[in-house]
Image (tube, rainbow, N blue to C red):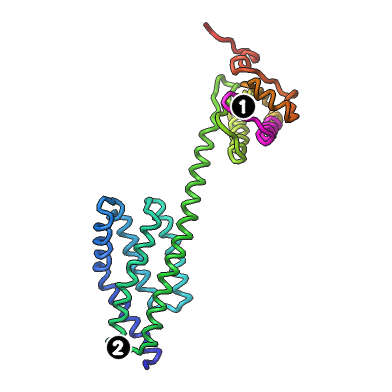
């Protein structure tokens, strides 16, 4: 049986062999991808080439590190790689396939070097199981970090869409109209609050008309959010009016016991504008 120092030397040799044959390994996965996914453009992009190169470097380096250090290396790589893959829209299942792909190829290198250095079966198993652990850990982390990065991107995109769905239109220097369209959920209601207050303060509005013509349902949650917006705007000195209160909406609000008596409301936007001095020009 070899000494610990001899095992370290064997690992260094394997590390050097992986680095020396890096391009062979990369070409192998490129060939595999071309056969399985002939129309995939992403598989041959510069970014994908870079991540394959980094993956092999990480595998090679992890072979010579203690287990806890190898885990730290994989953690750092996983977070960075996941962000890259999400950015270039590289599918997670293909990424996991590629991470697994090198298990057998590098495993063969480990076997050949173990044989050349006359390692015992136990020593060979020790080296191979350590590498298997690295591969499994890499798969787990890339999956976790990928989904976190993907979810963060989705949330960011949704926030951007929500902001675009709460536009304020300047109809005069001191008057704005906020037309609401579609359902109001908790997040969008918060965006409504933020946009209404920020825009009103920036523009120095005296009047803000919130048009509800495109809101299909007014329930308790929506009404409470509107109340909060009205109260906050009043603190800024903005005279807020509601328009687009359809009969069915008015009936629903009444049945829910909602009271907007403190706020002027109108059945249509043009009536709300007329109330503050805007006359329709024929």
Q: In the rendered view, tell whether residue 202 sits above or below residue 89.
A: above
Left or right of 235? Residue 89 is: left
Residue at the extreme top = 282
Mark 2 lies on a secondary structure that is loop
Q: Residue at x 66, y 22 (%)?
A: 241
Residue at the extreme bottom = 1
Residue toward you, 280 or 29: 29
Residue at mark 1? 204
Magenta residues, as a range? 212-232
Q: In the rendered view, tell whether residue 41 sits above or below residue 113.
A: above
> In which quarter of the view is residue 205 placed?
top right
> In which quarter of the view is residue 27 placed?
bottom left
Residue toward you, 268 or 201: 268
x then y, percent, for residue 262? 75, 24
> In which quarter of the view is residue 102 placed?
bottom left
Disc marking residue 117 = 2
x then y, percent, for residue 29? 28, 63
Residue toward you, 98 or 23: 98
Dominant secondary-structure state across the stretch colored magenta: helix
Q: Quadrant of the N terminus?
A: bottom left
- Residue 222 within the segment the image draws in magenta: yes
| Disc 2 to disc 1, C-alpha distance | 80 Å
Q: Residue at x 56, y 19 (%)?
A: 172
Left or right of 8? Residue 36 is: left
Q: Residue at x 61, y 32 (%)?
A: 196
Mark 1 lies on a secondary structure that is loop
CA neighbours of label 1 inside 10 A, class few (<14), some (14 to 19), many (20+): some
CA neighbours of label 2 inside 10 A, class few (<14), some (14 to 19), many (20+): some
Q: Residue at x 52, y 6 (%)?
A: 282
Q: Nearer the viewer, mark 2 or mark 1?
A: 2
Residue toward you, 110 or 277: 110
């Amino acid at each position: 049986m070899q000494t610990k120092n001899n095992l370290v030397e064997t690992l260094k040799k394997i590390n050097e062999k992986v680095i020396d044959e890096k391009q062979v390994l990369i070409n192998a996965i490129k060939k595999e991808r071309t056969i399985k996914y002939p129309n995939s453009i992403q598989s041959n992009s510069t970014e994908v080439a870079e991540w394959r190169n980094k993956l092999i470097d990480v595998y090679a380096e992890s072979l010579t590190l203690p287990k806890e250090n190898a885990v730290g290396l994989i953690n750092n790589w996983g977070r960075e790689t996941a962000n890259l893959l999400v950015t270039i829209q590289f599918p997670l299942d293909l990424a996991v396939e590629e991470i697994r792909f090198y298990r057998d190829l590098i495993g063969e290198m480990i076997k050949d070097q173990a044989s050349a250095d006359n390692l015992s079966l136990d020593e060979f198993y020790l080296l191979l199981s350590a590498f298997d652990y690295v591969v499994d850990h890499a798969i787990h982390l890339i999956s976790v970090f990928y989904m976190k990065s993907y979810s963060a991107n989705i949330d960011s995109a949704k926030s951007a869409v929500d902001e675009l769905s709460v536009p304020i239109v300047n109809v005069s220097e001191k008057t704005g109209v906020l037309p609401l369209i579609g359902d109001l959920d908790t997040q969008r209601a918060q965006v409504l609050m933020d946009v209404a207050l920020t825009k009103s303060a920036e523009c120095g509005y005296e009047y803000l008309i919130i048009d509800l013509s495109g809101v299909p349902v007014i329930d308790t949650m929506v009404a409470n959010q509107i109340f909060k917006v009205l109260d906050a705007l009043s603190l800024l000195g903005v005279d807020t009016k509601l328009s687009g209160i359809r009969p069915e909406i008015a009936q629903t609000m009444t049945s829910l016991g909602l009271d907007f008596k403190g706020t002027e409301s109108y059945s249509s936007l043009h009536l709300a504008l007329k109330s503050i001095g805007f006359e329709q020009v024929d």
